Each structure stands twice: as C-alpha cells, then as structure tokens.
Amino acid sequence: MNSRDDMTLKREDVTPARPAPASSARKGTRKRGVAGVVSALAVIGFAGAMVAPTGVALAQQPDPASPESAYSLALADTQNLTVTSDGAAIAPVQRGTFTVYVTPTPTPTPTPTEKSPSSPSGGGGGGGGPLFYTGGGAPAEWMSAAGIAEGDWGYVDYIVSRESGWNPNATNKSSGACGLVQALPCSKVPGNGYDPIDNLRWATGYATGRYGSWAGAHAFWTKNHWW
C-alpha cells in the first residue's frame, strides 16, 4: 500500500462532530439570562440598603433655628427609652419625688441647781456640794443662834464684813472658800458651809482654837488681812 492509500484511510477513519441540538442551545441562553437578571436585582438591592440610612438621616436633620443639640436629643432618648434584651421597647421609667419627715429630738432643758459652781466638794451637801442659803435673817440673829457672846459681836462683824460682806453664799472662785467667814475648805463646816449659823459656829471653834478668842482672831486679821 502506498502513501496515498494511507492518507485516504486516515481521512475515512475520522468521524465528524455532530452539531448540538437546537433545543439545548436555547436552554443555555435562557439560564444565562435569568442569572443576569438576578445579579442585577441583587446589585440594586445592595445599593438601596447602603443609600437608605443616609437618606433617612438627611431627612431627619434638625432645624438650624432649633436650640436643641444632638447631645440633648440623645440624652432625652436615653432617659425616656428602655429596651429589653429581646429588643422590645417598654414604657419609660416614671420618676417621682417623696418627702421624709424626721421627728426632731427635743433639746434637754438643764435642771436648775442651787449648788455652788466654785465648791463642788463643799461640806454639808450630802456629797453633792453645799446648797446656797435662802433662809433669810440678819447678822445679830445669826450670831445669837450660833452661840457667840454679844461682847464678841464687834470682832465677828469686823472679820465677816471684810471676808464676805455678810453674804452667806459668798464663794471664792479661786480657792473655793465659802460662807460668811470664808471657811477653807468649805467641807470643813459641819452641816452646810453656806448656812450662816453653821458657818459662824465653825468660825467660833476656829477663832478660839487658833487665836485663843475672837479678840485674838481680830488682832491677827488687822495685821495680816487674813486669818
């Protein structure tokens, strides 16, 4: 067999390709058309989603002449709107006021006292200090009641007038000496150091015990201005 015969056989062995049916071609074209429409709609929807919030925000811009600011509007929304975890809006919180009445505590009123503020440990007061004398009377009556002889009244009057001015309630603020003769300390006087009779009775014992008599006490006082 020669080369021409070989070439003839090879051409005969080649099977020509069959053309696709017309119906298949039409189906492919239709699918591509539907896909294109869907893609176009998706692009349009996406663009609308991007533009819509901007348009709403522009439509809701506040009036330039309005005094309200973005901060005040946001603050009002924060105070008046509460949202649950599920996203459902509930009623705004109602804020009210109330008044608390406190009963005032009465201020205690101090109880008046007759105790001497300068001699809290004076005698004759039952441990709580002596009481001021309020019984009245006169120097002659007190000396007589205290048992002082009338011959000594002049000496007593001289000393008492300078010690207390015949004030039964006289008190030395610095030393605490009390009564007519300024007994020191006041607790030495049996009874009540501010009682004139008790004070003079104690003074008689002091004058005779230390100076021998009221006359001796008077002499010492005139030289030393104390006794």
Image (tube, rainbow, N blue to C red):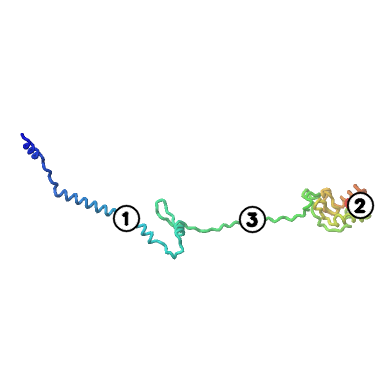
Nearer to me, 47 or 209: 47
Q: CA distance from mark 1 to mark 3?
A: 74 Å
Nearer to me, 177 or 78: 78
In the picture, measured across the screen, residue 155 lies left or right of residue 29, that is right
SS of the residue at dot 3? loop
| Extreme residue toward the front, this view | 3
Instruction: Residue 120 in the image: state x and y as whole percent.
Output: 78, 50
If the image is split into quadrants, where does the N terminus sit? top left
Location of residue 11 with respect to 35 vertically, above or below: above
Q: Earlier in the sequence, mark 1 or mark 3?
A: 1
Disc 1, disc 2: CB below 8 Å? no
Q: Residues within 10 Å of mark 2 (few under 14, many from 20)?
A: few
Which residue is labeled 3 in the image?
105
Which residue is labeled 2 in the image?
223
Instruction: Residue 184 in the image: state x and y as whole percent.
Output: 84, 49
| Extreme residue toward the bottom, this view | 65
For the residue marked with disc 2, what is the amino acid?
Lys
Q: CA distance from mark 1 to mark 2?
A: 125 Å
Viewer can see residue 47: yes
Q: CA distance from mark 2 to mark 3?
A: 60 Å
Task: Please name the residue shown 19% across and 51% down the image.
Answer: 29
Which residue is labeled 1 in the image?
47
Disc 1, disc 3: CB below 8 Å? no
Instruction: Residue 145 in the image: state x and y as whole percent.
Output: 88, 54
Viewer can see residue 144: no
For the residue marked with disc 1, what is the amino acid?
Ala
Q: Residues within 10 Å of mark 1 (few under 14, many from 20)?
A: few
